Image (cartoon, rainbow, N blue to C red):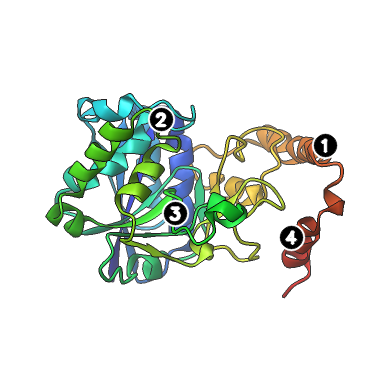
Amino acid sequence: MTEINVCISCDDNYSKYASVVIASILYNTGNDDYLHFYILDGKISSENKTKILSLEEIKPCRIEFVEVDESKFEIYKQINTHEYITLPAYYRLMLQKLLPNVKKIIYLDCDIVVNTSLKNLFETDLEDNIIAGVLDARVKHKKKWKNTKYINSGMVVFDLEKIRKENIEQQFIEYTKNNTNKIQTGDQEIINCTLEGRIKILPDEWNVQVSGFASRTSFTRHPKIIHYIGYYKPWVFGSCTFFKDLYFKYLQITPWALTKEEQKYWYDENKKASRINFWKKRPLCFLNPKYWYAFYCSYIKQ
């Protein structure tokens, strides 16, 4: 039996989305995998905690809530960046203290679904590196970022033993103090800039970042982890997010499963709205070679 440590950070508003992440993992886990989930608690209500704990019925696992003292994050409250980057996003910068007995862990954002066992990812050999992750969408899509080993922090494998030994937490704090008014991508920027040269790059399939049909970091038909980046998440009505059907698939095995009436709204009406919005925003997309390449990889390539 392999025990796999997974960490998710959320507040009460994101409880439902965190449960979808957990449900997707349990749905796809191997017979010899035992999942230990650590949820960094950003003031989750008792009602929603009970709902999340009920996910243990999908498959035997352990779900543990970890209290967080937000007063320890005052330095990060001063950062002014995207509105969807909330304080719980910075909790990962103190994992070594919040989880003192954990040596290694996979950190996942709440806007993710997992489609495979996490065993191979958890057993990744980090060698001399501190963390491992997948290149960020900006690196993949913009020439100026070419050859830059800048990862997306939505999925990160952390070696917490090395972080403690090398006092990486203090390095995160010092970087933030020196760059508070310059930081644009929150925790992600802090992690990448502080650990430059100590990050192992993993295959794209472990964090396929998706915002639209042709806006994906990989056009694989079988992504191991899907990360719905940007503002237009699957739960935003009429969003053009690709692979959003998988989000609703896993939602249905959580306590937040849709009723038949809600399914009609989120399946039928939502799909219609998505198609309309897609053609409104990208009326000439068929002239873009990237669109046809995405179409080929998604529907024709074996």
Q: In which quarter of the image is residue 299?
A: bottom right
Location of residue 148 with respect to 11 vertically, above or below: below
- Element type at mark 3: loop
Measuring 40% from the left and 32% from the top, which residue is drawn there? 182
- Element type at mark 1: helix
Q: Where is residue 110 in the image (x, y as percent from the top left)?
A: 45, 42
Residue lying farthest bottom? Answer: 302
Measuring 66% from the left and 44% from the top, which residue is drawn there? 241
Query: Can residue 226 be seen at all in this image of the molecule?
Result: no
Of labels 4 and 3, earlier in sequence is 3
Of labels 3 and 1, earlier in sequence is 3
> For residue 86, which numbered disc appears in the image?
2
Residues at marks 1 and 2 touching, judged by CB atoms closer than 8 Å:
no
In the picture, measured across the screen, residue 73 lies left or right of residue 50, that is: left
Of labels 1 and 4, the one closer to you:
4
Q: How far apart are marks 1 and 4 (CA)?
A: 19 Å
Q: How far apart are marks 3 and 2 (CA)?
A: 21 Å
Residues at marks 1 and 4 touching, judged by CB atoms closer than 8 Å:
no
Q: Distance between the residues labelled 4 and 2?
A: 32 Å
The residue that disc 4 covers is: 294
Specify the amino acid type for callout 1: Ile
Q: Which of 61 and 123 is in front in this view?
A: 123
> For residue 150, which numbered disc appears in the image?
3
Of labels 4 and 2, earlier in sequence is 2
Q: How far apart are marks 1 and 2 (CA)?
A: 31 Å
Location of residue 66 with respect to 33 vertically, above or below: above
Q: Position of residue 280 (x, y in %)?
A: 83, 35
Of labels 1 and 2, the one closer to you:
2
